[in-house]
Amino acid sequence: MKKGMIIGLSILGGIFFIIAMFVIWGISSYNNLVTLSESVNQSWSQVENQYQRRADLIPNLVSTVKGYANFERGVLTDVTNARASVGQLKVTKDVLDDPQAFQKFQAVQGQLSGALSRLLVTVENYPDLKANENFLELQAQLEGTENRIAVERRRFNETVQGYNTDIRRFPTSMLAGVFGFRNKQYFKAIAGSETPPKVEF
């Protein structure tokens, strides 16, 4: 009887060990998913900060350019309207889980980028404006911001890749499904971005 009891306790101990290991794995995997999710949110915040910096520079840029009476008003109107569209778009971190909302965010930002590109190309026709110290400073800040946006978008995509990969791996994918961890969206190139703006003199 003692031998049977020892075997029973061994089996029971083995079952408890397996359950404990499963619980430890579950806690560890869940905590890892939370960490990865927060990394995505933090990376998203950096992207938003850079877009906000760009939006904050635009009124000063438009003001400086408006001083040149012959400057094409349509170009300034496009930039102002595109910035207004960006300002009207209410974005929360939930946009990362909604492909349509994410695409809308990216499209609106892409329209603003396009309008700014047209503005900077049009400036080439105005040598006095190109030599204006305020304009040159704003242009340098805008170019620096565009570079920061590109860097932060790349970092964001790398962070999202790590997160998306982890939630799709088995057996973590089961845990991710139970706790509502969903794929996040990537930034993609805007259609037509491979073609540089045309400069005509």
Image: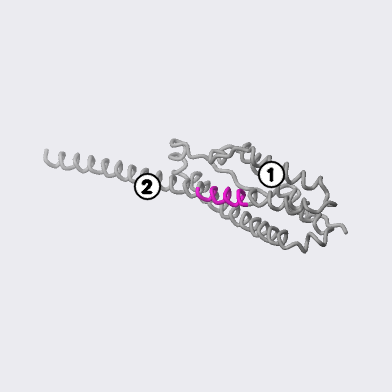
Q: How is the image coloured?
A: one colour
Image spot of residue 48 (x, y percent):
58, 48
Tell me, yes or no, whether the highlighted magenta stretch contains residue 44: yes
- What's the magenta bit mostly, secondary-structure-wise? helix
Is residue 117 rendered to the left or right of residue 31? right
Q: Residue at x 87, y 57 (%)?
A: 200
Q: Residue at x 56, y 55 (%)?
A: 155
* Label 1 crowd (10 A; few <14 / some 14-19 / many >=20): many
- Element assignment for label 2: helix
Residue nearer the viewer, 63 or 103: 63
Image spot of residue 62 (x, y percent):
73, 50
**Residue type indicated by callout 1:** Arg
Q: Residue furthest right?
A: 201
- Element assignment for label 1: helix
Tell me, yes or no, whether the highlighted magenta stretch contains residue 5: no
Image spot of residue 166 (x, y percent):
48, 48
Residue nearer the viewer, 52 or 43: 52
Image spot of residue 71 (x, y percent):
83, 51
Q: Check disc 1 and report the residue beneath it.
A: 83
What distance separates the C-alpha of mark 1 from that of mark 2? 44 Å
Is residue 51 rendered to the left or right of residue 62? left
Q: Check disc 2 and report the residue beneath it.
A: 28
Q: Mark 1 or 2, which is nearer the eye?
A: 1
**Residue type indicated by callout 2:** Ser
- Residue range in magenta is 42-53
* Marks 1 & 2, CB-CB < 8 Å contact: no
